[in-house]
Image (cartoon, rainbow, N blue to C red):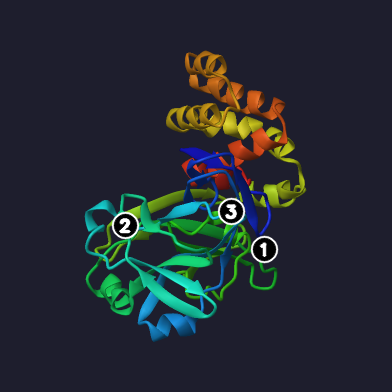
Amino acid sequence: MQHGQPQPNTSRNFRCPGPGVFQCTLTGLMFDVSQGAELLYRTAQWDERLLQQASKIAAGPLFNIESSEDAIHQLHLPHCIPKHALHSNGLSVVHISDGEMEILKPLNIIDTHVIVEVTHLSSFGLVWPLDMLMSLWHQEKTILGQVLLFLRPPNPRTQTQNINVFLLPRNIPVKEEKKFHPDFGPNYHPTFEVRLPANTEEVLITVQDQAQTEVWRWDTDLTDVQSRDNQPRLQSLPADKRLFSVRIQFVEKVSDSTLNQLLDRLLQEEIITMEEMEAARIKPRAERARDVIDVVRNKGERASSFLIDALCELDKHLFGSLGLS
């Protein structure tokens, strides 16, 4: 399997050099192609009318997919279902074309993706039965999720600052949510707000399930976030310079496990050589981290962008704390 690197805009394109299975590092979407092809894909807005008519609710993004050749014969759509519930969740795939929606039976459902056969392209997405929404609340069924924190500017009149906490299924790409919007649409779960005195410097945020068991926690340094907000926005910098701007924090915070996974992905993408990977692996963690970020920066914009996207996928907490999102 190879990893495709999308272009940094709303529509993403990738050239498959030949037959094989290719995965988008941003969305998790996988393409099983029979020949080389140019792929163009983007997330699209669900039509709530079509969903209601079919008694379905969205279970992930809707992907609009085009190809220059008739090459894609299977799609792997990322899902957010825990392993123990894979075969009792009612997941199915919809194909939307010319305002009509058909339900497709999956070929297989694995730990991370739903696999479906493709005959022609347009829009594809995962759906649940409408009654699944009620069972999620009342039967304590679970999905795999992620938590996004948005710190709003302090209010000088009330001397407060608010943190919006955004709960998302795992299969929603984080980069699709660069800004906070209270109107979350059919794909996303509601948010809640933490209100703090304006001079608060640190806060521990936890999320609990219905049984009040802690499922997520994060120590947030608000002074660090505020100081980064006063710097020029990293998004305006080239990828190699973005990496250089967070080099010290990356070296201090990245874990052994994440470093080793990054090395594997960089080797698979042929950004580093086997010799470079083996030389880095034998070094202590901090020196290995310096090797990873410096070697990749020196290889240019494409390599640096790949490292940023891979870090986002492997360690979202570190990615967010570095301010790369």
User: Dot 2 corresponds to which residue?
Assistant: 107
| Label 3 to label 2: alpha-carbon separation | 23 Å
The residue type indicated by label 3 comes to Glu
| Label 1 to label 2: alpha-carbon separation | 48 Å
Q: Residue 230, how many percent across, how many down?
A: 74, 51
Q: Residue at x 44, y 54 (%)?
A: 73
User: Dot 3 corresponds to which residue?
Assistant: 69
Q: Residues within 10 Å of mark 2 (few under 14, many from 20)?
A: few
Task: Looking at the picture, tell me which residue is in the foreground, 152 or 299.
Answer: 299
Mark 3 or mark 2, earlier in chain: 3
Circle 1 or circle 3, nearest the eye: 3
Local SS, label 1: loop
State whether residue 209 is above or below residue 323: below
Task: Looking at the picture, tell me which residue is in the foreground, 321 or 85.
Answer: 85
Local SS, label 2: loop
User: Dot 1 corresponds to which residue?
Assistant: 153
For residue 14, side relative to residue 265 (left or right): right
Task: Looking at the picture, tell me which residue is in the foreground, 141 or 166.
Answer: 141
